[in-house]
Image (spheres, grey):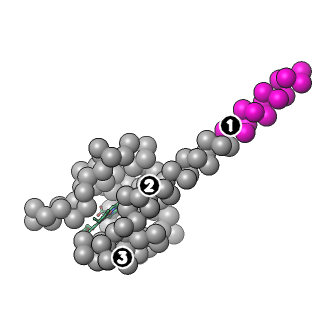
């Protein structure tokens, strides 16, 4: 009986551990792959962001211009303008799940 309780407690702790780990991953990925242009706050007030022409992701009106699917698509394939790369494709760098988590993170900026 005691062992069973212990097992349950351990399992619960593992579950909690995994979910916090996942959350940290999104934040880490944002800092590592996106923050240089879009900034920690999503406002793109960084040198690289200005140079690339990234826009303010905290602007709800701007965020209404694209669906989650469109964000995902652009993260996978990148954004080019007149043959010039504005945002590089991330499909080779990040997994589908990581990209989807980043789409969700993007949405949190405009709430
Ligand atoms: C080299 C700078 C740069 C990096 C790094 C970068 N972006 Fe972007 N991103 C841009 C630019 C520039 C645009 C604006 C494209 C446009 O609308 O003209 C953009 C647009 C976007 C948009 C607007 C949606 C859309 O469909 O246009 C989202 C959301 C976004 N980026 C998320 C991300 C995420 C998430 C990452 C990290 C995985 C990332 N970006 C990394 C430069 C960057």
Instruction: Measuring from the top left, give residue 59's x and y in whole percent.
Output: 41, 75
The residue located at (40%, 65%) in the rendering is 35
- The answer to whether 109 is drawn above or below residue 71 in the figure is below
Q: Can the viewer see residue 61 in this picture?
A: no
Q: Nearer the viewer, residue 13 or 96?
A: 13
Left or right for 74, reference 60: left
Q: Mark 2 points at which residue?
A: 29
Ligand 1 placement by image quarter: bottom left
The range drawn in magenta is 1-15
Q: Earlier in the sequence, mark 2 or mark 1?
A: 1
Q: Residue 14 carries which label?
A: 1
Q: Is the residue indicated by label 2 positioned so its CB lies within 8 Å of ligand 1?
A: yes
Taking the view exactly as shown, the residue that stands out farthest to the left is 82
Q: Mark 3 points at which residue?
A: 46
All told, the count of numbered labels is 3
Q: Earlier in the sequence, mark 2 or mark 3?
A: 2
Q: Is the residue indicated by label 1 positioned so its CB lies within 8 Å of ligand 1?
A: no
Q: Is mark 3 on a helix, strand or loop?
A: loop
- The answer to whether 107 is drawn above or below residue 16 in the figure is below
Instruction: Measuring from the top left, give residue 109's x and y in whole percent.
Output: 47, 68
Left or right for 70, reference 103: left
The residue located at (37%, 78%) in the rendering is 45
What separation in Å lies between label 2 and label 3 (alpha carbons)? Answer: 17 Å
The residue located at (85%, 23%) in the rendering is 3
Q: Residues within 10 Å of mark 3 (few under 14, many from 20)?
A: some
Left or right for 8, reference 98: right
Q: Is mark 1 on a helix, strand or loop?
A: helix
Q: What secondary structure is the stretch in magenta mostly built from?
A: helix
Q: Nearer the viewer, residue 57 or 13?
A: 13
């Amino acid at each position: 009986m005691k062992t069973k309780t212990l097992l349950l407690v351990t399992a619960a702790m593992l579950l909690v551990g995994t979910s916090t780990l996942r959350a940290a991953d999104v934040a880490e990925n944002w800092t590592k792959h996106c923050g240089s242009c879009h900034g920690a706050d999503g406002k793109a007030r960084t040198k690289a962001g200005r140079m690339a022409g990234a826009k303010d992701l905290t602007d709800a009106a701007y965020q209404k211009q694209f669906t989650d699917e469109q964000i995902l698509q652009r993260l996978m394939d990148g954004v080019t303008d007149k043959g010039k790369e504005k945002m590089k494709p991330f499909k080779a760098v990040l997994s589908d799940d990581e990209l989807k988590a980043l789409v969700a993170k993007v949405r949190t900026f405009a709430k």
